[in-house]
Amino acid sequence: MRKETSTISENVEVLRQTIAAACTRVGRNPDEITLVAVTKTVPPERIQEAIDAGIRILGENRVQEAASKIDRISADVSWHMVGHLQKNKVKKAVAMFDMIQSVDSFGLAVEIDKRCSQIDRVMDVLVEVNTSGEETKFGVSPQEVLDLVARISQLNNIRVKGLMTIGAFSENESVVRRCFATLRELSNEVKAHISGVEMQFLSMGMSSDYVWAIEEGSNMLRIGTAIFGPRQT
Ligand SMILES: *Cc1c(COP(=O)(O)O)cnc(C)c1O
């Protein structure tokens, strides 16, 4: 019998099966795919349900909101910052997050580097790219990526681990796929031209477009709605 609402653990299970099926179709190993559960607006009790279902990386888009949850979740999980980060929040952010996926300027990278050096740590980051050209989206333009990654790679307390993008806000499959293909091509360009930078992660794909993202080479998905249901905002 079909149920009206599914539980978080059921959602995680369906998600894993869909990821595995997409990987099989394109000859990839599902173990390559890192799943980040995006927990913005989700209360700690429900986050705990996802952790109980095997989720190990949580993504938040606001420093303040993340701070209140990190204190209340005792499990051994990693936290990723996936939203736009203001320089005046960097000091707090570097003390909380294991990765910052939304580096979109050299100035922000310098601030992260400075604050990390003060607490003697190295922060893993992704450079966020605006692959859709939509004005509402953050991220550097594709043309700026090589130069920005090269400059960040000179800093000691920040380490570029890949690229991140949000696909176009469109139901047109080819338009969305083009965004993901652009990120993959940029990652390959960085690998070819900048030494000493490990392009380990291609963070692309959300609830509405993660299957396309996998088919285009994503190895890090950021999924909210498909795990926790629609957000009340
Ligand atoms: C909210 C958010 C997600 C998850 O979006 P869903 O559509 O709910 O899966 C992924 N990435 C970023 C940057 C987000 O802000």
Image (cartoon, rainbow, N blue to C red):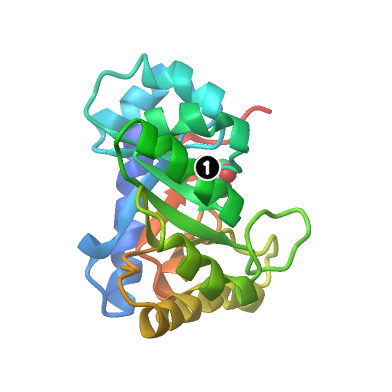
Q: Mark 1 points at which residue?
A: 111
Residues 103 and 232: in front is 103
Q: Quadrant of the rendered structure where residue 129 is?
A: bottom right
Percent x, y for residue 223? 46, 47
Percent x, y for residue 108? 57, 47
Badge 1 marks a residue whose secondary structure is: helix
Residue at (31% x, 44% y) in the render: 122
Q: Is residue 3 left or right of residue 34?
A: right
Q: In this view, does 128 lie to the left or right of 56?
A: right
Residue at (49% x, 65% y) in the render: 151
Q: Does residue 228 appear in this view?
A: yes
Kind of residue sitting beneath label 1: Glu
Percent x, y for residue 103? 53, 52
Residues 183 and 192: in front is 192
**Crowd band around label 1 with a 10 angstrom C-alpha radius: few (<14), some (14–19), many (20+):** some
Is residue 140 depicted above or below 207 in this figure?
Answer: below
Percent x, y for residue 114? 45, 40
Is residue 62 depicted above or below 205 in this figure?
Answer: above
Q: Does residue 7 appear in this view?
A: no
Which quadrant, please, contains the N terminus? top left
